[in-house]
Image (cartoon, grey):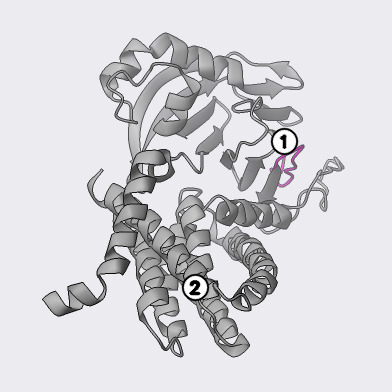
Amino acid sequence: MLFFFDKYRQHYLWCLCIFLILLTGFPSWAQAHTYSASFTKVKMDTNKTELIFSLDTLSIIELIEDIDKNNNNDVDKSEIKKASVELEELIHHRLSLDLNNRQQEPELEKMKLEKKEDKNYLTFYLRFSAFTPGDTVSFTDGLYTNDPDTNYVNLISFEYPGASGQAVLQGKERTWTILVTENQEEQSSDGGTTVPDGGQTPGDSQTQQGHAQTSSSSGWFSFFKLGMLHILTGYDHLLFLFALLLRKQTFKQYAAVVTSFTVAHSITISLAVLGLVTLPSRFVEAVIAFSICYVALENVFRKNLKHRWGITFLFGLIHGLGFASILKEMNIPKSNLAVALFNFNIGIEVVQLMIVLLLLPLLTYMFKLKFSDKIIRYGSYAIFALGLIWLVERLFL
């Protein structure tokens, strides 16, 4: 044991130094709010309209100054009570539900702390007047509109007697519009995108009354963009992918690694959203961080990477559960699930493929340099240190 430690002492010292530098100099990397998501449910019937809006507590802290009195990166019931006025103003000023271009005044029935996938959310229960056939209803989300670099996304589920649908609001697309009709078949979006129950694309069908609808974007593209955004803001997934490519390998090995990762996370995305596989998100996120550490150490200490695709497949199954977390909360009807899943996954794969195609020429050039071994070694140390920070943070903080 002492001989082993002495032999690799220099490696351990480098890992320790980089870990301490990252921990003290960049503590926000482990705690950064990398992805902000909200969930909106609109339930309409002949008596009332309910809007249930859930926002993660980190976003609440970002949007309302000094709400986190104890500085623990979360909010509790006492903090919500003290900031109730500011919270009500936030919802009334930033969220709106319009009837025929006239803003409706909601009644805030209650606010409630809830857990979704082991993460804390504050849920607002709003009540509006009932809408009738022929009305045009628009929901606008004004959160983070002044932040050009925001990665905020709002996932909407809509229910009306005889119909249901989903919409995704992201980027500059912040308004979702539907026309309430007699047969409740027609739904469309302006800005956001609705996928109506039954698989129709908004703008492609016509009601019995002859009301034609148009859409600024198609339903499939909405989930495609969501998949792209999800991996682009998933810095741990990207770091894992980079760690897999950093060590010099043959083209065949690279192809096997990328393919195994793609197949593995595609399987578990589907199984998780279908509810067939469920693991605690804290465990999933910790294993994802561990996978980064493992591959980084493999880059330094393992001489033969011939069968790396195997361990990549196993870790890819866990990464897929991480990818699926945001879709699970939407409760997408089975009639729409296949389309949503397919396009969400395609969005992830397109970004992943683009990253690989961009990195491989750069890595090929790097491998020709005399000091490429040092770049790989010290780069792997840095990757290991950052993965270790995430692992400690996700296990114990």
Against 103, residue 288 (above or below) is below
Label 2 belongs to which residue?
244
Q: For mark 2, does the 10 Å Cα neighbourhood hold few (<14), some (14 to 19), or many (20 or more) residues?
A: many
The kind of residue on which mark 1 rests is: Lys
Instruction: Work out whether residue 277 or residue 381 is closer to the camera in this orientation and state it.
Output: 381
The kind of residue on which mark 2 rests is: Leu
Give the residue displayed 40% in from the left and 86% down from the top.
303
Res 254 quadrant in image: bottom right
The question of residue 188 being in magenta is answered with yes
Instruction: Work out whether residue 248 or residue 14 is closer to the camera in this orientation and state it.
Output: 14
Against 116, residue 263 (above or below) is below
Drawn side of residue 147 relative to residue 332, left or right: right
Res 314 quadrant in image: bottom left
The question of residue 274 being in magenta is answered with no
Regarding mark 2 in the picture, which secondary structure is present there? helix
Q: Distance between the residues labelled 2 and 1?
A: 34 Å
Q: Is residue 221 visible?
A: yes
- The image position of residue 203, as x and y in percent, is 82, 48
Q: Is the magenta stretch mostly helix, strand or loop?
A: loop
- Tag 1 or tag 2, which sits nearer the N-term? 1
Residue that protrudes farthest toward the left in the picture: 2
Q: What stretch is highlighted in magenta?
A: 182-192
Instruction: Work out whether residue 180 or residue 311 is closer to the camera in this orientation and state it.
Output: 311
Label 1 belongs to which residue?
172
Drawn side of residue 356 relative to residue 378, left or right: right
- In the rendered image, the quadrant that contains the N terminus is bottom left
- In the rendered image, the quadrant that contains the C terminus is top left
Q: Is residue 280 visible?
A: no
Total numbered labels: 2
- The image position of residue 135, as x and y in percent, is 74, 27
- The image position of residue 128, as x and y in percent, is 56, 20
